[in-house]
């Protein structure tokens, strides 16, 4: 009786005694989900949780009306997720107090534990860097083109890097172009980290039983090498790199 009275008193100021008594006995209605649709090129900042690889706190979700979307980690200069279909479920970000996170809508292709895309190595067989320590890595934001699509920018080893991804014309994936202003001596790009990488041709590589493919667009030939997690696809970075992720 005491609990019921508390419920009634708490709502008297809103709707009056008679209505409040009814409301106090009704189960709480579950809020409707909050969905974000990319009817135009759309950018949403939020946390993103990666399966088995923790939370990305500096993520930028880039949505396209072509229904091909991706998430970029500004803290590592890496694409961490790529998917087709609907864009984002922002319920956990905007309902009630929220936790700042959103979820992809649909089945996404994830690219493993976040790590730098570019690194300075002594050779193409040297272990990939574990974090940004000693790299002088510094994200410098992103700029939008006339259509509202971003080019991400950061500094690493004193070199300014621009990183732009665009949806392929047929919607089969994205084309990524990384360019640098400054010296890139000893720098490499890691294009994939997976359990298995199969070479189809000098320009095409299949990742994890056709989860996705990497296609080199500028004639460079990468190296497939062993890693603690399985295999890595690594290529020398000479100041410009263009490749496609097909899924």
Image: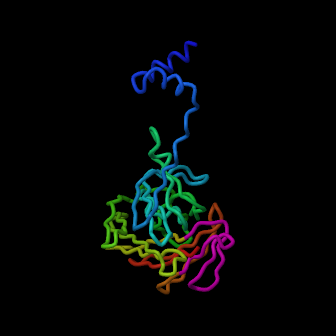
Q: Is residue 87 visible?
A: yes
Q: Residue at x 55, y 66 (%)?
A: 85
Q: Residue at x 55, y 18 (%)?
A: 4
Queried whether the magenta region covers residue 41, the answer comes back as no
Q: Residue at x 35, y 58 (%)?
A: 138
The segment highlighted magenta reads 192-215
Queried whether the magenta region covers residue 203, the answer comes back as yes
In terms of depth relative to the viewer, which is nearer, 117 or 244? 244
Q: Is residue 182 above or below residue 80?
A: below
Magenta part, dominant SS: strand
Q: Name, please, the residue furthest toward the front.
A: 18
Q: Residue at x 40, y 78 (%)?
A: 240
Q: Specify the quadrant that holds the N terminus.
A: top right
Q: Name, please, the residue furthest toward the top.
A: 2
Q: Is residue 34 above or below residue 160?
A: above
In the image, residue 118 lies at what x, y percent? 45, 67
Q: Specify the quadrant that holds the C terminus.
A: bottom right
In the image, residue 74 lies at what x, y percent? 41, 59
Query: Which quadrant of the structure image shows residue 60?
Result: bottom left
Q: Is residue 110 above or below residue 5?
A: below
In the image, residue 39 lies at what x, y percent? 43, 66
Q: How many marks?
A: 0
Q: Name, please, the residue furthest toward the right.
A: 209
In terms of depth relative to the viewer, which is nearer, 151 or 113? 151
In the image, residue 7 lies at what x, y percent? 51, 21
Query: Which quadrant of the structure image shows residue 50?
Result: bottom right
Q: Is residue 94 above or below residue 150?
A: above
| Applied colour scheme | rainbow
Q: Is residue 151 visible?
A: no
């Amino acid at each position: 009786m005491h609990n019921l009275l508390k419920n009634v008193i708490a709502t008297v100021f809103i709707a009056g005694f008679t209505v409040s008594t009814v409301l106090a006995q009704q189960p709480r209605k579950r809020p409707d989900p909050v969905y974000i649709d990319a009817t135009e090129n759309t950018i949403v900042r939020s946390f993103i949780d990666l399966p088995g690889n923790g939370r990305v706190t500096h993520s930028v979700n880039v949505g396209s009306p072509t229904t091909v979307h991706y998430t970029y980690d500004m803290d590592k200069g890496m694409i961490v997720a790529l998917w087709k279909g609907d864009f984002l479920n922002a319920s956990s970000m905007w309902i009630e107090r929220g936790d700042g996170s959103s979820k992809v809508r649909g089945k996404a292709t994830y690219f493993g534990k976040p790590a730098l895309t570019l690194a300075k190595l002594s050779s193409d067989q040297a272990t990939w860097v574990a974090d940004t320590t000693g790299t002088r890595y510094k994200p410098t934001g992103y700029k939008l083109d006339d259509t509202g699509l971003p080019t991400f920018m950061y500094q690493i080893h004193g070199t300014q890097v621009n990183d732009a991804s665009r949806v392929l014309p047929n919607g089969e994936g994205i084309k990524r172009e990384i360019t640098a202003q400054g010296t890139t001596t000893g720098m490499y790009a890691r294009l994939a980290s997976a359990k298995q990488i199969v070479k189809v041709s000098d320009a095409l590589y299949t990742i994890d039983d056709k989860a996705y493919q990497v296609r080199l667009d500028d004639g460079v030939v990468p190296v497939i090498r062993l890693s603690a997690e399985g295999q890595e696809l690594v290529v020398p970075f000479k100041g410009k790199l263009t490749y496609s992720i097909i899924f």
